[in-house]
Image (spheres, rainbow, N blue to C red):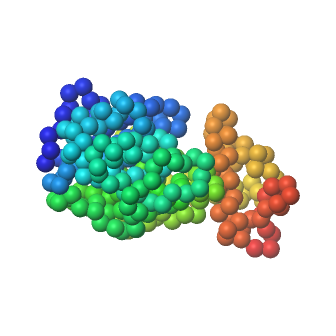
Amino acid sequence: MQKILFEQLPLIKITDDLYRLRCNNPGMMTGTGTNTYLVDGEAGFAIIAPVPNGPDHINNILLAVGGPGNITMILVTHMHPDHSPAALPLAKLSNAPVYGSSAVDDPFQDVTCQPDVIIEHNQILSLGDITIRCLHTPGHVDNHVCYMLEQGGIIITGDHIMQGSTVVIIPPHGKMKAYIESLQLLLDYPVKQLAPGHGEMITTPIDEIQGLVKHRLGREQKVIDKLSMASPISLAQLTPLVYDDVDVSLHQVAELSLHAHLLKLAEEDRAICTDEQWLWRVDKNK
């Protein structure tokens, strides 16, 4: 085990082996800031979600672990700009490999992050006394990965699950069908806690996961109900009807997830789109 330095660091001890270091990047999409997790094993540290490439956060990581030589691996949950840009600088400083899924052609991607090792679903990584299971969880984005600390049953969820907020699904590389299935996938594992990319620890993981699935399916039913009453209708016109329980200032973001819901229904042949006008309607023949 390495010595963790708490002085003057925004560092929280979660277990004897797991620490959270929060980045100072609060905002509408990041909440109180993006969480980096430090896993302390006999073979060194795994840095999970190294987040923005800013000198303060990188220096805090290095201070917390006692220097770059103590970093064994760098794990990326996904390649959005608030989750992965520090991976390359940390890799150069530490010579530690970066693990993650393949990049996708998406304007929201951090193009600086090119993993050295492309991980596979259920792949096991070892820090000696600690094993980390890699879980491919597409939905928020196709290349999203969660990491499960098997000894403690803690899943580090990145943006798959956020505490206190639902996740935005942005097509085409965000897919609602894949997201719901990936949530249900986590129920196959002996999870005891969730460590989200934003917010605090979630200590009732089963309730949280089941609640998220129920929420998404409930929103989907609302989409179907509104389409049935006002079809055909454009995406922009449908948004305030489906999200009438959400502040209008958030409707632009909500429209992205609504588009993902509609694409899921289209994939399941439960709705169709007229390409010329991007209007949606329930297919009465299905």
Residue drawn at (61%, 48%) of the image? 107
**Going 42% across and 53% down the picture, which residue do you hit?**
77
Q: Residue at x 15, y 54 (%)?
A: 42
- Nearest the viewer among 212 and 180 is 180
| 96 vs 125: above or below | above
Q: Nearer the viewer, residue 10 or 236?
A: 10
Across and down, in percent, residue 73 comes to: 29, 53
Task: Name the quarter where the C terminus is drawn.
Answer: bottom right
Relative to residue 214, is residue 12 drawn left or right?
left
Is residue 10 visible in this depiction of the protein? yes
Residue at position x 52%, y 48% in the image: 111
**Splitting the image into 4 quarters, where does residue 264 fall?**
bottom right
- Of the pair 126 and 229, the residue shown nearer to us: 126
Q: Nearer the viewer, residue 204 or 118?
A: 118
Q: Position of residue 232 (x, y in %)?
A: 84, 57
Q: Residue lying furthest right in this view?
A: 276
Q: Is residue 57 left or right of residue 109?
A: left
Total residue callouts: 0
Q: Residue furthest top?
A: 8
* Residue 185 against residue 231 in the figure, above or below: below
Q: Residue furthest bottom?
A: 285
Q: To which quarter of the image does residue 201 belong?
A: top left
Q: Position of residue 147 (x, y in %)?
A: 35, 57
Q: Place residue 284 in its image quadrant.
A: bottom right
In this rendering, the answer to whether 32 lies above or below 95 is: above
User: x, y percentage for residue 25?
Assistant: 44, 32
**Residue 12 appearing in the image:** no
